[in-house]
Each structure stands twice: as structure tokens, then as C-alpha cells.
Amino acid sequence: MNASRGVGEFDLIERLAARLEPLESGLGIGDDAAAWSPEPGRLVVATTDMLVEGIHFRLEWTTARDLGWKALAVNLSDLAAMGARPGRALVSIALLPGQADLAEQLYDGIAELARITGTRVVGGDTVRTPGPLVVNVALVGEADPERLLRRGGARPGDLLFVSGTVGASAAGLALLVAGDSAVLARPEAVPLLAAHHRPWPQLALGAALAGAGVRCAIDISDGVASEAWHLARASGVEIEVDLDRLPLSGEAVALLGSARARQLALTGGEDYQLLFTVPEAMLAAVEAALPPDVRLSVIGRVTAAREGGAVRFFEAGAPIDIPEAGYVAF
Ligand code: ADP
Ligand code: MG
């Protein structure tokens, strides 16, 4: 046994594991490592994201259950943006002494989204920390090697699409930061807080786009402006974005006004919608493949090849300066 931990940690791992679905195949929690057979001919796609208390979340604002959901959701969103299907996850947590109950609630949230999306938690690590709570999820999925969605897949002539609405999650966070209980009690706040605490990964859309032949997508973790720049740079193209077409969250507009809602959509982030480009010849195939509950908006166009990439924003037909910066971690 490692000197830094007690018997309680093994006990806790068992209680966490009990909340998860059993495996149909392969090795999961309980051995030195997880093991499974990838499907022949499929590409393995792997991603990881870490959430740190005080940086990415505050326990005064989120329940542990929602935090578990979100920790898995942000990873699933990365797979969605690659056109991949989820597979198996490893979950590592750093806890203060006395946070075992919180860890169990966290796993209830993880287990809930894992069940919905067919993700299996096959291992992880559990350690003590004197500092903030840390939750790290590593997620492995699979994709068709010929049909991966890449940031570098945009070509001149493509239309730029975004799914759903944008700005809701950042608006929810803005409400929490402002802390005005009268505003937080308004009915419009409910979907904004839900968007912030329980983002929905666009797995069905990502798979549909990949299947239809789309080649370029990114998920919106840092705001539309910064994600558009990522696509432009990786693809070596110039992208024009028509700000009048941004599908702003109606509740964000209602509570914060359209200017603030738009700014949050552009630079706030955590919407976990997909931003992607489609050649015009592929539009009918995309429409036919679309999951029934997904709404798409055309918000711009790839105008030209351009080394280094560029994004130009327009409002009422006139160019407008938008800072690229999304969420800045360091
Ligand atoms: P080791 O000392 O080899 O790292 P651990 O005691 O950390 O072993 O883990 C024992 C088993 O429990 C492993 O299968 C590991 O993947 C799993 N495990 C540990 N912590 C977690 C966790 N937080 N969530 C899921 N599985 C975990
Ligand atoms: Mg370990």
C-alpha cells in the first residue's frame, strides 16, 4: 500500500465503482489497468480534460452531481467534434479528506451521462490533495478513419454553421458571478444555469456530420470568435462571420440584453455546440442526416485560402473588430 493513503480509499473506489454500469467486455476497475479490444478497422480517438476547483468551477455554484456530468460532457464534446463515438473513460479525482460523499455524488452525475451516451468508466485514480478539488476525465472513442472531423478541413466556398444557440452557458455563469438573487430566480435563468452546469455534448450531430461527408468541425468551449480562429488557422483560410446571424440564446438576450448576450456568445464559451463548415454541394446530405432535434444556423462563409488564417466579423454588412480572446487560462 502506498503510504499516502489509507484503507478508506480502496473502500471509496468500490463505492464509486458500484454507481457505474458493469462492463460487457474487457477489463475495467479492479486490475492494474483497463483493457479492451478496439473494433477492427476503426480509428482510436482519445481526449482528456481537467476541471480544477476555483478555476473551472465553484462548489458554491454547482452540485457535485452536475460537476460529474460536466466533467464527462466536456470530454464527450471533444469526441463529438471529431465525429467519433464514445467508448471508455478513466476518471481521476484529487479530494480533500472528508470529500468521500461528494465523490459519490460526482460519480452519480458521471454515471448518469455515461449511461445515456453508452460510455463505460473503466478506471481512474483517487488521491488526496491539500488543495482544490480536481476532476480529470480521459476518454477513448472510435471513429471511421475515412470520416474524421478536423479543424483543418475548411475550404474556400464552404458555408460556416453553428448548432443550437450560443451564449447560454456564459450567460448562466455571468448570472452566478453577479449574484443577484432576484435575477437568478427569474424563469429565464433556469435554462441558462442548466446550460452552464449540464452541457449537452453534440454526439449525434458529430456522427451525422461525419457520416454525411463533412470534414471540418470544432466544439465551442471558448466562444465562437476563438473557435472560428482555430478553424481558420488550422485550415489556412479566411472566414467571414455575419454577427447578425448568430443564434443567440433568447434567455440570455432577455436577461442581459442583446449586446452582452452577443459578446458572451463570441468570447464566453462553454456552449459545447459544434462550429463546422460544409461545401455547398454537401448541404442536402447534411440536411438529410441531421438528428431531428438539432437546429443549425449558417453564420458565415469561408471566402479564400489564406496562409496563417484570418477571421473577419461583419455587422449589418460592415466590418467590425472582435477580440479573438476566449477564455484565457494562463
Ligand atoms: P494502482 O495503485 O495500481 O494505481 P489503484 O488503487 O489506484 O491502483 O486503483 C485500483 C483500481 O481502481 C484500478 O482499476 C483503477 O483504475 C481503479 N480506480 C481508482 N480510482 C478510480 C476512480 N476514481 N474512478 C474509477 N476507477 C478508479
Ligand atoms: Mg492509482
Image (spheres, rainbow, N blue to C red):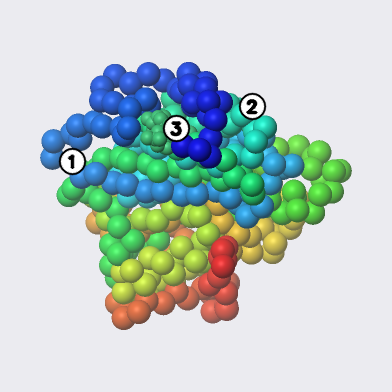
Tell me, yes or no, whether the two marked residues, 3 and 2, touch with CB atoms within 8 Å: no
Q: Quadrant of the N terminus?
A: top left
On screen, residue 309 above or below 258: below
Name the amino acid, label 2. Answer: Asp
Location of residue 273 with respect to 100 vertically, above or below: below
Label 1 sits on what residue type? Arg
Q: Which label's residue is closer to the chain start, 3 or 2?
A: 3
Q: Is residue 150 visible?
A: yes
Neighbourhood count class around disc 1 (C-alpha, 10 Å): few under 14, some 14–19, many 20 upward: some
Compare residues 33 and 231 and report the one nearer the observer.
33
What residue is shown at x 59% (from left), y 45% (from top)?
129
- Regarding residue 250, the answer to whether it shows in the image is no
Label 3, secondary structure: give it.
loop
Q: Label 3 to label 2, Cα distance in Å?
A: 23 Å
User: Which residue is label 3 attached to?
Assistant: 1
Name which residue type carries label 3.
Met
Marker disc for residue 42: 1
Which comes sooner in the sequence, label 1 or label 3?
3
- Horizontal side of 323 relative to 154 (left or right) equals right
Indicate left or right for 260 with 26 as reference: right
Q: Earlier in the sequence, mark 1 or mark 2?
A: 1
Q: Quadrant of residue 91?
A: top left
